[in-house]
Amino acid sequence: MSTERTFIAIKPDGVQRGLIGPILTRFEQRGFKLVALKLTWANEGLLRQHYEDLQEKPFFPSLLSYMLSGPVLATVWEGKDVVKQGRVILGATNPLASAPGTIRGDFAIDMGRNVIHGSDSVETANREIGLWFKNEELVDYKSALNAWIY
Ligand code: RTP
Protein backbone atom coordinates (compact mmCIF):
# COMPACT_ATOMS: atom_id res chain seq x y z
CA MET A 1 0.00 0.00 0.00
CA SER A 2 1.37 3.43 -0.95
CA THR A 3 1.70 6.26 1.52
CA GLU A 4 2.57 8.83 -1.15
CA ARG A 5 0.72 12.07 -0.46
CA THR A 6 -0.15 15.17 -2.44
CA PHE A 7 -1.43 18.64 -1.63
CA ILE A 8 -4.52 19.68 -3.59
CA ALA A 9 -6.12 23.09 -3.08
CA ILE A 10 -9.41 24.27 -4.53
CA LYS A 11 -8.69 27.91 -5.35
CA PRO A 12 -11.03 30.82 -4.46
CA ASP A 13 -12.93 30.61 -7.78
CA GLY A 14 -13.55 26.87 -7.30
CA VAL A 15 -14.90 27.46 -3.79
CA GLN A 16 -17.14 30.37 -4.88
CA ARG A 17 -18.50 28.43 -7.86
CA GLY A 18 -19.63 25.53 -5.67
CA LEU A 19 -17.15 23.07 -7.15
CA ILE A 20 -15.91 21.57 -3.85
CA GLY A 21 -18.28 18.60 -4.01
CA PRO A 22 -17.63 17.59 -7.64
CA ILE A 23 -13.87 17.97 -7.20
CA LEU A 24 -13.63 15.94 -3.99
CA THR A 25 -15.80 13.28 -5.64
CA ARG A 26 -13.28 12.83 -8.46
CA PHE A 27 -10.46 12.08 -6.01
CA GLU A 28 -12.62 9.81 -3.86
CA GLN A 29 -13.96 7.88 -6.83
CA ARG A 30 -10.48 7.34 -8.24
CA GLY A 31 -9.65 5.53 -5.00
CA PHE A 32 -7.56 8.08 -3.11
CA LYS A 33 -7.75 8.47 0.64
CA LEU A 34 -8.47 11.89 2.15
CA VAL A 35 -6.10 12.56 5.05
CA ALA A 36 -6.65 16.29 5.67
CA LEU A 37 -9.12 19.00 4.70
CA LYS A 38 -9.72 22.58 5.77
CA LEU A 39 -11.39 25.71 4.45
CA THR A 40 -8.94 28.54 5.02
CA TRP A 41 -8.32 32.09 3.86
CA ALA A 42 -4.62 32.13 3.06
CA ASN A 43 -2.44 35.09 4.00
CA GLU A 44 0.20 36.72 1.83
CA GLY A 45 3.10 35.20 3.81
CA LEU A 46 1.87 31.66 3.25
CA LEU A 47 1.23 32.29 -0.45
CA ARG A 48 4.67 33.82 -0.95
CA GLN A 49 6.19 30.65 0.52
CA HIS A 50 3.86 28.40 -1.46
CA TYR A 51 4.69 30.14 -4.75
CA GLU A 52 8.33 30.79 -3.82
CA ASP A 53 9.62 29.86 -7.30
CA LEU A 54 7.16 32.18 -9.10
CA GLN A 55 7.85 35.43 -7.21
CA GLU A 56 9.82 36.98 -10.09
CA LYS A 57 7.23 36.10 -12.76
CA PRO A 58 5.28 39.00 -14.29
CA PHE A 59 1.98 37.32 -13.42
CA PHE A 60 2.89 36.93 -9.74
CA PRO A 61 0.97 40.04 -8.45
CA SER A 62 -2.23 38.93 -10.17
CA LEU A 63 -1.72 35.34 -8.95
CA LEU A 64 -1.33 36.67 -5.40
CA SER A 65 -4.45 38.82 -5.50
CA TYR A 66 -6.42 35.93 -7.04
CA MET A 67 -5.33 33.55 -4.29
CA LEU A 68 -6.11 36.19 -1.61
CA SER A 69 -9.58 36.93 -3.02
CA GLY A 70 -11.44 34.32 -0.95
CA PRO A 71 -11.17 31.09 1.00
CA VAL A 72 -9.32 28.07 -0.36
CA LEU A 73 -10.12 24.42 0.38
CA ALA A 74 -6.79 22.84 1.34
CA THR A 75 -6.66 19.05 1.14
CA VAL A 76 -4.19 16.19 1.37
CA TRP A 77 -4.72 12.90 -0.45
CA GLU A 78 -2.86 9.62 -0.16
CA GLY A 79 -2.46 6.66 -2.51
CA LYS A 80 -0.46 5.00 -5.25
CA ASP A 81 1.23 7.57 -7.52
CA VAL A 82 -1.16 10.22 -6.16
CA VAL A 83 1.13 13.15 -7.08
CA LYS A 84 1.25 12.28 -10.79
CA GLN A 85 -2.32 11.00 -10.86
CA GLY A 86 -3.46 14.22 -9.18
CA ARG A 87 -1.87 16.31 -11.94
CA VAL A 88 -3.65 14.16 -14.54
CA ILE A 89 -6.99 14.63 -12.77
CA LEU A 90 -6.39 18.42 -12.69
CA GLY A 91 -5.43 18.77 -16.37
CA ALA A 92 -2.97 21.23 -17.89
CA THR A 93 -2.32 24.56 -16.14
CA ASN A 94 -3.65 26.48 -19.15
CA PRO A 95 -7.31 25.50 -19.66
CA LEU A 96 -6.79 25.90 -23.41
CA ALA A 97 -4.59 22.80 -23.25
CA SER A 98 -6.51 20.83 -20.63
CA ALA A 99 -8.47 17.86 -21.92
CA PRO A 100 -12.20 17.44 -21.37
CA GLY A 101 -12.66 15.04 -18.48
CA THR A 102 -10.03 16.81 -16.39
CA ILE A 103 -11.05 19.34 -13.74
CA ARG A 104 -9.64 22.32 -15.63
CA GLY A 105 -10.83 20.88 -18.94
CA ASP A 106 -14.36 20.67 -17.57
CA PHE A 107 -14.55 23.75 -15.35
CA ALA A 108 -12.06 26.44 -16.46
CA ILE A 109 -11.39 28.70 -19.45
CA ASP A 110 -8.80 31.12 -18.08
CA MET A 111 -5.29 30.43 -16.73
CA GLY A 112 -5.79 33.14 -14.12
CA ARG A 113 -8.92 31.36 -12.81
CA ASN A 114 -7.95 27.73 -13.14
CA VAL A 115 -9.88 26.42 -10.13
CA ILE A 116 -7.35 24.11 -8.52
CA HIS A 117 -3.73 23.55 -7.50
CA GLY A 118 -1.90 20.22 -7.27
CA SER A 119 1.69 19.48 -6.19
CA ASP A 120 4.03 18.74 -9.09
CA SER A 121 6.43 16.31 -7.34
CA VAL A 122 6.64 14.21 -4.18
CA GLU A 123 9.23 16.62 -2.78
CA THR A 124 7.04 19.66 -3.48
CA ALA A 125 4.03 17.84 -2.02
CA ASN A 126 5.81 17.24 1.27
CA ARG A 127 6.92 20.87 1.41
CA GLU A 128 3.41 22.18 0.63
CA ILE A 129 1.70 19.83 3.11
CA GLY A 130 4.06 21.15 5.80
CA LEU A 131 3.23 24.75 4.86
CA TRP A 132 -0.54 24.41 4.87
CA PHE A 133 -1.09 21.85 7.66
CA LYS A 134 0.12 21.14 11.17
CA ASN A 135 1.15 17.54 11.73
CA GLU A 136 -1.85 16.88 13.99
CA GLU A 137 -4.24 17.96 11.21
CA LEU A 138 -3.14 14.98 9.08
CA VAL A 139 -5.52 12.24 10.16
CA ASP A 140 -4.02 8.79 10.54
CA TYR A 141 -6.63 6.11 9.89
CA LYS A 142 -7.00 2.86 8.01
CA SER A 143 -9.13 3.04 4.87
CA ALA A 144 -11.48 0.06 4.58
CA LEU A 145 -11.36 0.54 0.80
CA ASN A 146 -7.68 -0.28 0.57
CA ALA A 147 -8.29 -4.03 0.60
CA TRP A 148 -10.38 -3.63 -2.58
CA ILE A 149 -8.10 -1.19 -4.36
CA TYR A 150 -4.65 -2.72 -3.77
P1 RTP B 1 -0.63 25.09 -9.75
O1 RTP B 1 0.65 25.36 -8.99
O2 RTP B 1 -1.71 26.09 -9.47
O3 RTP B 1 -1.09 23.67 -9.66
O4 RTP B 1 -0.29 25.33 -11.25
P2 RTP B 1 0.89 24.74 -12.07
O5 RTP B 1 1.91 24.04 -11.23
O6 RTP B 1 0.24 23.93 -13.13
O7 RTP B 1 1.48 26.07 -12.68
P3 RTP B 1 2.55 27.08 -12.11
O8 RTP B 1 3.49 27.40 -13.21
O9 RTP B 1 3.10 26.62 -10.79
O10 RTP B 1 1.66 28.38 -11.87
C1 RTP B 1 0.90 28.54 -10.72
C2 RTP B 1 -0.39 29.25 -11.05
O11 RTP B 1 -0.09 30.57 -11.52
C3 RTP B 1 -1.04 30.96 -12.49
N1 RTP B 1 -0.33 31.26 -13.72
N2 RTP B 1 -0.63 32.30 -14.48
N3 RTP B 1 1.16 33.15 -17.51
C4 RTP B 1 0.23 33.27 -16.57
O12 RTP B 1 -0.59 34.15 -16.57
C5 RTP B 1 0.24 32.28 -15.51
N4 RTP B 1 1.03 31.25 -15.40
C6 RTP B 1 0.68 30.61 -14.27
C7 RTP B 1 -2.00 29.81 -12.68
O13 RTP B 1 -3.12 30.04 -11.82
C8 RTP B 1 -1.19 28.63 -12.20
O14 RTP B 1 -2.01 27.58 -11.79
Image (spheres, rainbow, N blue to C red):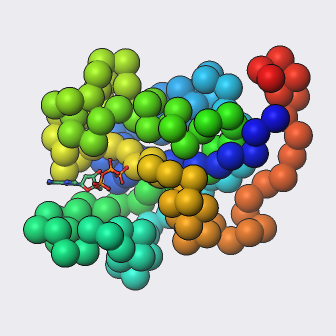
Residue 9 placed where, x, y %? Answer: 47, 51
Q: Nearer the viewer, residue 97 or 68?
A: 97
Residue 90 placed where, x, y %? Answer: 40, 35
| Residue at position x 57%, y 53% in the image | 122
Q: Nearer the viewer, residue 83 or 41?
A: 83
Please identify the quadrant where the N terminus is shown.
top right
- Asked if 122 appears above or below 100 in the picture, the reply is below
Q: How many labels does the image show?
A: 0
Residue 150 placed where, x, y %? Answer: 80, 23
Look at the image and tell me whether residue 90 can be seen.
yes
Look at the image and tell me whether residue 65 can be seen.
no
| Residue at position x 25%, y 74% in the image | 55
Residue 76 placed where, x, y %? Answer: 62, 50
| Residue at position x 11%, y 68% in the image | 58
Q: Nearer the viewer, residue 44 or 79?
A: 79
Quadrant of residue 109 in the image? Answer: top left
- Asked if 92 appears above or below 140 in the picture, the reply is above
Q: In this view, does 37 lie to the left or right of 56?
A: right
Furthest-bottom residue in this view: 45
